[in-house]
Image (tube, grey):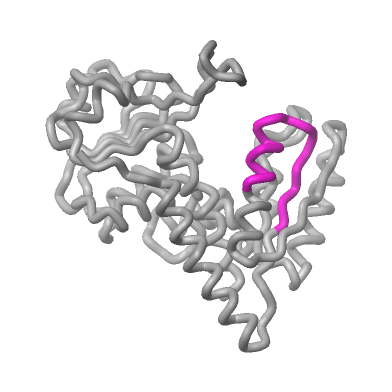
Amino acid sequence: MTIIDGKKTAAEIKKEIAAEVNEIENKGGRAPHLAAILVGHDGGSETYVANKVKACGECGFRSSLIRFEDDVTEERLLEEIKRLNEDDGVDGFIVQLPLPKHIDEQRVIRAIDPDKDVDGFHPVNVGKMSIGLPGFVSATPAGIIELLRRYGVETKGKHAVVLGRSNIVGKPMATLLMQKANPGNCTVTVCHSATPNIKEICREADIIVAALGVPGFVTEDMVRPGATVIDVGTTRVPDATRKSGWRLRGDVDFDNVAEKCAFITPVPGGVGPMTICSLMMNTLKAYKG
């Protein structure tokens, strides 16, 4: 059993990016520039954005953080997006989700220039991904594909089961796994809340990607020996032994599932670090044009 170390892999990739940026600057070029728009003071969003700013520093990028209060109007937000779209000094930018309920998230996403949409959420980039054209891929699925590549996980001809159908993880993950690529070339089954026989389907899988947001959902009796299990779940659960009073738990019952697997990602330290790392890779790609 091999534990896929996302934290270590992400650190290696950020060093590779930093070396490339250093070379660009030594030749007289400027550093890539990632901007982020943060609305309100949601604790999770604050942490995510802080980690993205930190990663920019590690990669040698320039970063900008644009803040708005919860009561910002949709029109004002769209004005800022237009400004960033037109700013040649900004290579890519993100609007941190979720947004307040009075703002139409899809309208905001559609307003972003697809060539600067390093989150990979714009319909143009989603469409490009679905037909195998170059574009920006949603960060978490892109990070998972990179982990499979770097750990040499065989995917060709394998049966992959994706648990979850979100626009950010489940759907793009299924699309990438079925692409004629390496990693890829899988036969893919997508399961969700309306799937009646999830356990039986999972037992037939060579690769399971769990992205339901249900702690411990994937149990030992759902996994065949030698399977690869990728855990995308990050749910806070109470833990009296921790100073914080909580810990992160994945969608997989790691302690009981791990020994059956050929490869497995832990939580934390698996998929999570690769999500921000993928955003850095997308930003460098946007810079290069």
Left or right: residue 222 versus residue 149 is left
Image quadrant assignment for residue 240: top right
Left or right: residue 282 versus residue 204 is right
Q: Position of residue 148 (x, y in %)?
A: 30, 51
Count how many numbered circles sit on residues in the image: 0
| Depicted 128 relative to depicted 275: above or below | below
Residue extent of the magenta highlight: 35-51
Q: Is residue 3 visible?
A: yes
Identify the residue shown where x is 37% and y is 45%.
Answer: 5
**Quadrant (top left/top right/bottom left/bottom right) for the C terminus:** bottom right
Q: Is residue 198 visible?
A: no
Q: Is residue 46 covered in magenta?
A: yes
* Camera-side residue of 120 and 234: 234
Identify the residue shown where x is 46% and y is 53%.
Answer: 10
Identify the residue shown where x is 84% and y is 53%.
Answer: 79
Image quadrant assignment for residue 211: top left
Residue placed farthest to the bottom in the image?
A: 27
Q: Position of residue 195 (x, y in %)?
A: 31, 20
Image quadrant assignment for residue 171: top left
**Quadrant (top left/top right/bottom left/bottom right) for the N terminus:** top left
Left or right: residue 243 versus residue 169 is right
Residue placed farthest to the left in the image?
A: 225
Left or right: residue 133 versus residue 102 is left
